[in-house]
Image: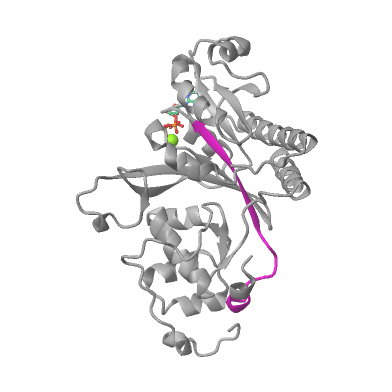
Amino acid sequence: MGQPNDPRGNLVRPYAVTRGRTEPRRDIPIEAVLVASQAAVQEARFAGHDKYRIAVLCEPRAQSLAEIAAYSRLPLGVARVLVADMVADGMLSLHSAAPKEGFTERMDLLERVLSGLRKL
Amino acid sequence: MDFASSKRAGAQPKEITSAKIVVAGGFGVGKTTLVGAVSEIEPLTTEAVMTSAGQGIDDASKVPGKETTTVAMDFGRITMADDLILYLFGTPGQTRFWFMWDELIRGAVGAAVLVDTRRISDAFAPLDYFENRHLPYLVALNCFDGAPRYEPEEVREALAISPNVPLILTDARNRESVKQVLVGVVEHAMRTLVAEQGRGFPAPVG
Ligand SMILES: Nc1nc2c(ncn2[C@@H]2O[C@H](COP(=O)(O)OP(=O)(O)OP(=O)(O)O)[C@@H](O)[C@H]2O)c(=O)[nH]1
Ligand SMILES: [Mg+2]
């Protein structure tokens, strides 16, 4: 992917069916952000209405799972299943929530958040 | 970051970290107002569908006969840098939705518990909740107009707030005031982290 090749080649990928599935393929924190590349948006055209809208939403800027659910008017659990599928299928890249372990990593993040708040 | 899928998605290599602060408190204490005062977006609402047993489900039609409830949470966003976003999550006001609070506080930097001094006893349940969690929190007294002006120390005593929990006054409508609340949460989280490190147990947050 990456160049504007014929996205129809991706149709062989099984059409994702969410209905009836309640467990996401991976747990995604509510605040973790997701990003879609332009190529991924093209690919998502063939992945169904909801997934396409999610990809379009995450292309211009990173959006959290919570934002995706709110803008798509989907319950959080449904959005989580769709987003987890899209991550597994390479349509969205999942970024990291705040580190939970490691003194230095956690302190660095707190310092960055603190200076971000002071600059508001 | 999920490297395998990001390569296929052709994502930019820069990792974006997102952090969250939780704004808790009883019904109508000003949580949404506080979030809106600093958020760069109008506070958004996301809904979770729960069974009466308190378990998250995704499709209410899959559990015929079981009662379901929709829990709404609102949140705001502050983009701090191209690789750092802070989210502010307001808890659902009703205390019967504790299980949702558990999901919200997981991985949070810290929390602010808002208290309306006109209805002080509404704060007992939220404060009890945080007392039993591993999450740094502070108490912010929302100064509604015409609210009785207690001395912070009177409120601390009335609510039995432990001495190591910071207590500050705020006006949830005021951006500068809300900034100070959030700065207070992060500073308290830093002190807590340093103290944990000093005692030699890096307890996980949340
Ligand atoms: N005077 C005054 N009014 C406030 C203040 N904060 C909130 N309010 C008002 O109080 C009402 C409730 O505020 P919300 O922000 O909706 O409270 P909430 O905690 O989100 O409420 P729930 O989500 O329903 O639990 C609104 O009408 C606000 O305009 C404050 O600091 N001063
Ligand atoms: Mg609210």
Task: Give the residue drawn at x 44%, y 63%.
Answer: A24
Q: Position of A69 compared to B106: left or right?
A: left
Q: What residue occupies the far front of the structure in this picture? A: B200
Q: Position of B42 compared to B182: left or right?
A: left
Decide which of B69, A69 is in the foreground and name it: B69
Task: Give the residue drawn at x 66%, y 70%.
Answer: B12
Q: What residue occupies the far left of the structure in this picture? A: B65
Give the residues in magenta: B7-24
Q: Quadrant of residue B192?
A: top right
**Residue A4: x, y in percent?**
56, 86
**Residue B128: x, y in percent?**
51, 26
Locate the C terminus of chain B by quadrant: top right
Residue B150 visible in rendering: yes
Task: Give the residue drawn at x 76%, y 46%.
Answer: A103
**Residue B169: x, y in percent?**
61, 21
Find ligand 1 in the image and state its quadrant. top left
